[in-house]
Image (spheres, helix red, strand yellow):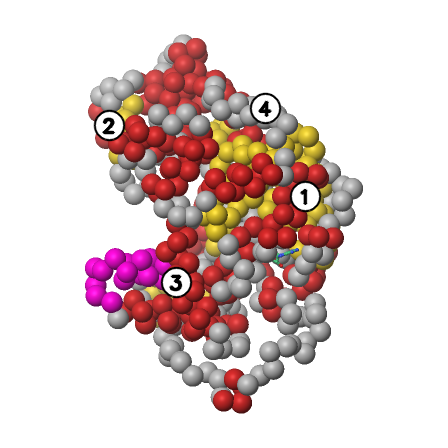
Amino acid sequence: MLGLIGAGAFAASYTAPILLWFHAYSPNRDERPTTRQIPVNSVAENPYDAVPYQSTSYPVTRPANLYTVGTLFGVSAPDFRTASVLELGCASGGNLIPLAFQYPDGHYTGIDYSERQIEMAAKTVSELDLKNIEFIARPFAEMPSLDKFDYIICHGVYSWVDDDARKQILEICRNQLVENGLAVVSYNTLPGWNMVRSLREMMLYHAKLFEDPIEKVSQAMELLRFVRDNNPEGSTYRNVIDSEINLLSEQSISYVAHDHLESENSQFYFHEFTAALGHHGLQYVGDSNISQMYVDNLPEEAAEKLQTVTDILRQEQYMDFVRNRRFRSSIVCSESIAVNRNLNMTAIHDFYLSSAIEPDEADLKAETSDTRFRDRDGNVVFTTHTKEAAVLFSELYESRRPIKSSDLVDMAARNLDDADHDVLRGVIEGLGLRLVLKGWITLHAEAGSHVSHVSEMPEASRLVRHQAALHGWATNALHERIGHDLFTRVLIGYLDGSNSLDNLCQIMSEQVDKGVLAVQVDGKDIADAEQRRLIIRNLTENALGSIAQKALLVA
Ligand SMILES: C[S@@+](CC[C@H](N)C(=O)[O-])C[C@H]1O[C@@H](n2cnc3c(N)ncnc32)[C@H](O)[C@@H]1O
């Protein structure tokens, strides 16, 4: 087996075996004074200063996505490329900085009361020499009130602050959005959080025994394992705990420290959230993931019943009950804007499309009239019944970049010996939006700034190279966080557009010679120089292909 060995692990892990401790305090330490001696606003006072949040990009929060959902529901939101964007609770800028980098004609402002995180953000801004972004280290209560914004992002904050800060968030959305502006606010929801809440309370109870934030996390996790392991296999309780452990095990320490162990964590029914919007002159536009709003995605019987509920807000509330939903990311706007919920099928032509469903090769070859399409797990999720539909959705799957429906029609027409363009457009209108609502086709407001193939002198953006070197992951052109293995991480550092494939292979060989990387077969270094050269070339070509496919190349 071919293996790559990296020098050093990227992050500490709390998944390694540890002991569960029930007596962390000595009697003396238990008698600590209850009033703190630490000055207010010192590093120790703010939990986000003590353990900064792992700050990263969230694709659904992109203004381009808010624009897309807004447009579908009849809100003509400002141009996202030149927009003025505010992020509330921006942490160290992991979401905002890639947006500022990608849209140099926009203006970006981040506010967060954690000075340490704002300093980290400012450092990245200066390293990337960005001129269109500023960060403010202040609580929301002190937000400069004169500025207006086209888009406001508030992700992962609303549930983790007190009532006052929650009101401030909605006030800022009401008073500081331009008339047709859009905001996205995410929050923990009920009923899904009911079960998680009792687990969080157990974790908090036990974590209080410990002072060190990292130890709090590892002990809280260990307590969950202890409770799970002492319940019978297959019991409902054990299954619930098990799935929470699985979910948390994939997250960073800072996620568990803040999302589960923070002193503030409030959850809301969707109807409570929309009522709060109403009190602040705001209204719900849609979910930042529109497939979540589609009632037909529920089991047939539930879908049939809930289709009879004509009030969309009530319908979504019932959908949350059925799904036991635990998190929402809602797009909101001023209540003065008319939101049109009757989707117009032709709206699909205004967007770029990408698809995640693959046509069955055998069906295509057999030239039957039916072609099955499968999701990533190989399940058949959709079957086309005409040649036109099969070709259109196969072309869409093949396209490595989001594509305008008019271009898709041209491509399919060529493939079908100049089939009628209107017929093909009709197929897209008839099926396209339904597939979007099912979540199998994604709508994009633009094609993205990336190239889909490896050029002679491949180039990753300065942002991608900076992030890869620093974190081992990078934000791609679709605002997704993409993790890298060590080989790819090192390679990305040299993708500045000045190296050909031959140069890159040479550079990677040198990295192996220097011991930065080790290339092994069956656990052993490769002695034969020619064999090693060939393997490194192969690895480099594969890594470049994958980097391109993941929308990380700009030239
Ligand atoms: C859970 S973190 C989420 C960070 C980021 N939005 C994300 O999702 O990755 C919450 C952030 O809100 C900030 N925050 C909490 N209350 C605040 C307040 N009243 N004023 C300003 N920032 C606040 C915290 O410092 C922290 O960075």
Query: Badge 3 is on which residue?
Result: 199
| Kind of residue sitting beneath label 3 | Leu
Q: Which mark is residue 338?
A: 4
Check contact, mark 3 vs mark 1: CB within 8 A.
Answer: no
The mark that comes first in sequence, 4 or 1, is 1
Does the Cβ of the disc 4 residue fall within 8 Å of ligand 1?
no
Q: Is residue 335 above or below residue 156?
A: above
Check contact, mark 3 vs mark 4: CB within 8 A.
Answer: no
Give the Cα distance between marks 2 and 4: 45 Å
Instruction: Give 494 or 437, whichever is nearer the viewer.
Output: 437
Does the Cβ of the disc 3 residue fall within 8 Å of ligand 1?
no
Does the Cβ of the disc 1 residue fall within 8 Å of ligand 1?
no
Q: Is residue 246 above or below residue 551?
A: below
The mark that comes first in sequence, 2 or 1, is 1
Q: Is residue 28 above or below residue 314?
A: below
Identify the residue at horizontal 55%, vertical 25% (top origin): 339
Q: Position of residue 316 (x, y in %)?
A: 42, 35
Does dot 3 land on a helix, a strand or a loop?
Answer: helix
Q: Position of residue 330 (x, y in %)?
A: 52, 40
Query: Badge 2 is on which residue?
Result: 363
Does dot 2 land on a helix, a strand or a loop?
Answer: helix
Does dot 4 land on a helix, a strand or a loop?
Answer: loop
Query: Badge 1 is on which residue?
Result: 172
Answer yes or no: is residue 9 visible. Answer: no
| Kind of residue sitting beneath label 2 | Asp
The mark that comes first in sequence, 3 or 2, is 3
Give the Cα distance between marks 3 and 1: 33 Å
